[in-house]
Image (cartoon, coloured by chain):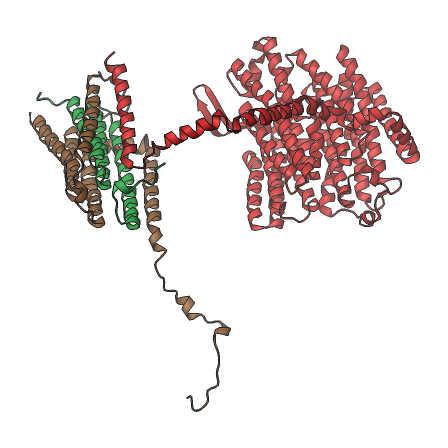
Chain colours: A brown, B red, C green
Amino acid sequence: MNEALVFYVLATFSIISAVMVVFSCAVNSVLFLIMVFISVSGLFLLLGAEFLAMMLLIIYAGAFAVLLLMLPLMLNIKETYQHTAVKCSAFGVTVGLLLFSCLAFVLKVKPQRLENDVSLAVANNVKALGEVLYTDYAYLFQLCGMVLFVAIVGVIMLMIRNGMEIKEHKIAGQIIRSADEIELKQLTDGEK
Amino acid sequence: MFTAMVFLPLLGALIAGLCYFYKKVAFSKFITCFCVGIATILSVFVLYEVVFLEASQVIEIAPWISVGSFKVVWSFNFDVLSVVMVSVIIWISFLVHVFSIGFIEKSYTVPSFMSYLSLFTFFMLVLVLSDNLIQMFFALESACLVSYFLIRCGNDREAVEKAALKSFLINRVGDIALIVGIFAVYNLFGSFNFAEILQNAHKHADSSITVICLLFLVAAMVKSAQIGVHTWLVDAMEAETPVSVLVHSTAIAGAGIFLVARMFPMFELSQTSLTVMIVIGGATAFFAAASACVQTDIKRVMAFSNISQFGLIFVAFGVGGVRIAIFYFIIHSISKSLLFLGVGSAIHALSNEVDLRKMGGICRQVKLTCVLMWVGTLTMIGFPFLSGYYSIGTVMEAVYSYKGWEGTYSFILISMTVFLTAFYLGRLMFMLFHGEQHGDEKVMAHVAESPFTILFPLLLLAVGSVFSYCFICECFVVDKLIGALFFLVPLFGIFNAYVLYLKKPNIPEAILNKFKNTHGFLLNGLYFDKLYEHVFIRPVYAFGNVLLNKVEAFLSTDSCICKIFAGTSYNIRKLHSGFVYHYALAMIVGVTVFVLWYISVEVLL
Amino acid sequence: MLSIGLNHYLLLSAFLFATGACGVFINHKNITAMLLSVELMLVSVSLNLVAFSCFHNDLTGQVFAVFILVAAVAEAVVGIAVFIIYFLNHKSIEAENMSGLKG
């Protein structure tokens, strides 16, 4: 009873936020996306996936969304083009409805139970996930690390272009003198 | 120790390869010789342990392929056969490395050359030590590839390029046979492991075994340059002398021998394949020996000599089995390497002159080389109480006691081959070292004994070729009649050569003029090159010409095809609007279509 | 109605996904909003996976949800960097003007 209530609250919350993400202006839509993240992480908790819930909350709603928030603020996006043509909206909604109805059809499929070799027998979700992640999926996990690493390198490579223009202070170049740059002159008394 | 022996040459090759980038010529020479030298010392211990202590073993290195029942493992199989082959290969490789130090002039390609030599040695070791067909195939292909590099290395003459390409391409013919054979083996036995295959070989029908044996035989014959496909080995002599010694007289050709030796229990089950082996081997031995008698390029003489000897080894397989053939192979590799390196030394002394007619009379200047080469020659022709006497004797005995027409056939051909061998080697020696000097005065003025690094391998090989039989076989007893016969035949051959080329040099000319056709026939290696040109190359060229002139001309002018392409691409171009959301739309539509398809298949049905 | 099953979660996830998909088209001039919509879709997919994982008692779904989140972060970060660079170069990031791929 309580579980159902919590689910409906969170689901309604996330649906409204999701719709608002699509239909509101730049900064607001990021804020609504954070709302979606929060409510989905609540759903994760409801499902018993504590680790994922915390991860979503901390990394996504906490850190990552701030980064997203930077984007419209930094780029100083004007609000002028926010009102899209009705035709486009109608088209988008049609596509969305079509996709949704297609996906909803999947509910009619009787899901076959797969032979699950990885079970939730361990009471602690984080522990269970860790045990699977570091044993069976160790290579994939490493691969994830590689993906992130490549992303970091890629971003740096994108940004380094500006670094080229930075003027450096070359001390060595200033100090060194070669023989032909120096000229010795005899000064007469009057010049002294 | 066992594993280190195999991987040391690889290490040397890698380090020498790095030396190429840092231009460290001397160091690359040192490191490869050092690594192969250590491996050589280890090989002695391995030989002792495996052959005398009878401690055969299989060392698994790493899993390779594992798909269901299809399992292949990198592993080294140290048994008597493979260890004996390893010793031969690694010793000769080591001596060739040392020889190369003095032989190859200072140039920027030296590091890569030394690196390739070591790499080749490594792959040959992997090849003979492999305990399954897949690993063997892999090593064989790698060795062929490296030998291609070796032939080309440091030489950009067109003839060298062509020779390298030719040897590479003709070897592929054998590989097709080999890989089909491997598939057939897997189909029949469900395994690639030699031990399993040979254990179960007798359970299968004769016909299938015969097919497999013939396929392997084709592969082995291409590698060992038997008649019909011998052309690659002759042309490959364009390479540097050390390469010819290691690659073409010992290793790649030895790979063919090894292939037959490894699968021999299977060959024994199929009389047909043994007969084919004897027939082709005998023919090869005789014709190649005859060709060697008329060649004027000194390295080509050696090439045909190789081919003839490998024919002899195949006959030995056919009539006598593995022991005799491998015994013969070992003695032959040692004495042939000695001769070949001696030839290299002489070429070096003569400033890279290879035409026999321009040599002669240099025995005073290069005494040591001359003496050592005479030792090699006498061993090769089976002079009594040198190693060659025993090896040829045992082969002859086996041939003599072999029943049926094959025995008679091969006895006649091999007798003649032995005679011809003595003749052409005598001819080579007399034309090279004795008689009058025919060379340019400039060249002759520079004739001098080669440096120590060249002579050292020769000395070692000379000792080996005289005494090696003591270590290998005590059980070979030579029949008295055969012994007497093969005392006389080679002497007769040498004597003939002595008379014809030293005492009466005008007689060969007269004979040559009389039998011009035969001479040309033999000089050009039985015209197999011409045959291939007419059968394979010309039709392909003609086909290419038709494609170029007719088909392409039709397609490339302003005909339908061009217009279709232009029109279609103009229309397709419009699809690319450049807007992100159009691409996204395409994606979403695709996803929706797939979901709809899934629904229509899974849900509604 | 009151007991929550797998279907409820699947429906919710499908709705979020569809919203994200139509967001890409509705906001087709605003490239940042497109990025947000894509994030929305990714979250809905991971919700889907976690729901399956819990109701099938199989951790694999959660493992892959972790991987999806990682991929989403990497993608979004690179995307943001590209937008910033684009903005610095062109002084605007209106999707209407981005047609460099035009054939």
Q: How many labels does the image show?
A: 0
Q: Which of B585 and B434 is in front in this view?
A: B585
Q: Nearer the viewer, residue B406 or B459?
A: B406
What residue is at 25 percent from the left and 32 percent from the top? C65
B400 left or right, relative to B511:
left
C59 left or right, relative to B31:
left
Q: Quadrant of residue B226?
A: top right
Q: Nearer the viewer, residue A106 or C65?
A: A106
* Image location of residue B505, percent across then percent down: 91, 34
* Image location of residue B439, percent across then percent down: 84, 44
Q: Quadrant of residue B147?
A: top right
For residue A124, say whether it is visible: no
Q: Which of B502 and B523 is in front in this view?
A: B523
Residue at the extreme bottom: A189
In the rendered image of this protein, does residue A168 appear above or below residue B81?
below
Q: Look at the image and tell me in which quarter the C terminus of chain B lies.
A: top left
Q: In which quarter of the image is residue A174?
A: bottom left
Q: Look at the image and tell me in which quarter the N terminus of chain B lies.
A: top right
A95 left or right, relative to B511:
left
For residue C38, say whether it is visible: yes
* Image location of residue B44, percent across then percent down: 63, 35
* Image location of residue B188, percent across then percent down: 53, 13
